[in-house]
């Protein structure tokens, strides 16, 4: 039986949607086993090259191997490139003396999953989206230790654990933090508060509708904090920033826990992290899923909307007429907002990071 502290290799990257839960899982593992060895694996082109070292973890990289969607020269090269990535992955696993590989999806994960199987190392998978990605659909066939953020996610024998998230969010008491959060964001304390975000890159269609609705929001006594996305500020024809009573715009906010505490209602896309975080903190929301892609954002929102914790509106239907008719009425209906908050919290899971860490240690234990 092994007596050393566990060596954990975490695979995933490319986007914050993969990296954030990976880092949360890493933190929970360290909390349960402070001397655990932790190595993250990504690619040289992803956000992990910045975010993983900034969080204090070592990063190794393998080649990025996307799967071509149609016949091409890249498709002919795929077997060689994938084989190379698997060899790189196995060398990393063996050098780390890995007791377990934990994957969260993304391009890097499939070679890591295959390499873990070849090296006879236990594999634990977390799927963040309601519609699982290709890497985790493959990986789920290689292990019984599969966890999902959404109860409706279709992966065989998966355990619903929720979304691992930063402790500043998972431990948030919205009521207790509201006054300080509104001060921090430059908002008035006593006005119905709408906060709008399209994610880190912004959402042009949402921004256009908000711009056309501001005067009516102001007339209804609503204050709006609009997180526009980098380079997407709302400007007048003369180039000056749009100025309407009660309207505040910023390109980004560092610390979404302040947004969640300050808002009476959040208007956002339906990314997996956003949906799980607003459920965890019990925040009413209007969700406008991305209109393109494979429809995963609408699926992400489905459970929360079905429970009554959020309202979903299609991007094409999110017009100024809809926004000015529905949002002020909702913000002024305290009973409705409270019912939505309660329903959202009923689906919220605040300890998903710890649940994942415990799953990881169980997998290690079965191997010893």
Image (tube, rainbow, N blue to C red):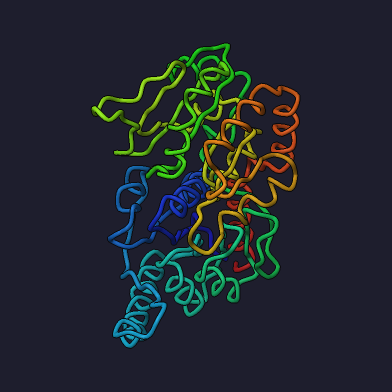
Measured as percent of width and height from the top left, residue 181 is found at: 50, 20
- Compared to residue 33, the image places residue 214 above or below, namely above
Measured as percent of width and height from the top left, residue 184 is found at: 44, 18
Classify residue 334 as left or right of residue 107.
right
Visible residue check, residue 32: no
Residue beneath the point at 53% across and 50% down: 316
Classify residue 31 as left or right of residue 59.
right
- Compared to residue 333, the image places residue 59 above or below, namely below
Visible residue check, residue 134: yes
Choose between 336 and 313: the one closer to the eye: 313
- Compared to residue 109, the image places residue 86 above or below, namely below
Total labels: the figure holds 0
Choose between 368 and 100: the one closer to the eye: 100
Measured as percent of width and height from the top left, residue 1 is found at: 57, 66
Residue beneath the point at 54% across and 72% down: 139
Residue beneath the point at 40% across and 31% down: 253
Choose between 297 and 356: the one closer to the eye: 297
Q: Residue 228: which quarter of the image?
A: top left
Find the residue positioned furthest to the bottom.
76
Residue beneath the point at 55% across and 46% down: 288
- Compared to residue 158, the image places residue 260 above or below, namely above
Find the residue positioned furthest to the left.
238
Q: Quadrant of the C terminus?
A: bottom right
Measured as percent of width and height from the top left, residue 30 is found at: 49, 45
């Amino acid at each position: 039986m092994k007596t050393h502290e566990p060596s954990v290799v975490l695979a995933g990257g490319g986007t914050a949607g993969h990296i954030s839960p990976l880092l949360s899982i890493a933190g929970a593992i360290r909390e349960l086993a402070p001397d655990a060895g932790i190595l993250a694996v990504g690619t040289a082109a992803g956000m992990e090259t910045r975010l993983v070292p900034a969080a204090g973890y070592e990063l190794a990289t393998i080649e990025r191997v996307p799967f071509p969607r149609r016949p091409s020269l890249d498709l002919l090269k795929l077997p060689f490139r994938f084989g190379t990535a698997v060899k790189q992955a196995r060398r990393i696993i063996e050098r780390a003396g890995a007791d377990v590989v934990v994957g969260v999806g993304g391009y890097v994960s499939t070679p890591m999953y295959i390499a873990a199987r070849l090296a006879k190392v236990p594999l634990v998978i977390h799927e963040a989206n309601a519609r699982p990605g290709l890497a985790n659909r493959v990986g789920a066939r290689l292990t019984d230790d599969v966890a999902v953020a959404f109860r409706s996610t279709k992966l065989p024998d998966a355990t619903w654990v929720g979304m691992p998230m930063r402790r500043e969010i998972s431990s948030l008491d919205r009521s207790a933090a509201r006054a300080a959060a509104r001060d921090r964001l430059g908002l008035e304390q006593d006005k119905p508060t709408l906060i709008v975000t399209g994610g880190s890159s912004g959402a042009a269609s949402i921004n256009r509708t908000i711009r056309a609705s501001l005067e009516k929001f102001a007339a209804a006594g609503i204050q709006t904090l609009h997180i526009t996305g980098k380079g997407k500020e709302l400007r007048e024809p003369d180039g000056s920033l749009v100025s309407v009573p009660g309207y505040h715009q910023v390109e980004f906010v560092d610390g979404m826990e302040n947004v969640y505490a300050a808002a009476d209602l959040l208007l956002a896309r339906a990314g997996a992290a956003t949906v799980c975080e607003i459920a965890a903190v019990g925040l009413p929301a209007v969700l406008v899923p991305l209109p393109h892609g494979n429809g995963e954002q609408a699926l992400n929102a489905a459970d929360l909307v079905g429970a009554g914790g959020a309202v979903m509106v299609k991007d094409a239907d999110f017009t100024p007429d809809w926004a000015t008719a529905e949002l002020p009425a909702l913000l002024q209906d305290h009973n409705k907002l409270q019912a939505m908050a309660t329903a959202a919290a009923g689906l919220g899971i605040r300890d998903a990071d710890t649940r994942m860490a415990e799953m990881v240690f169980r997998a290690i234990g079965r191997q010893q």
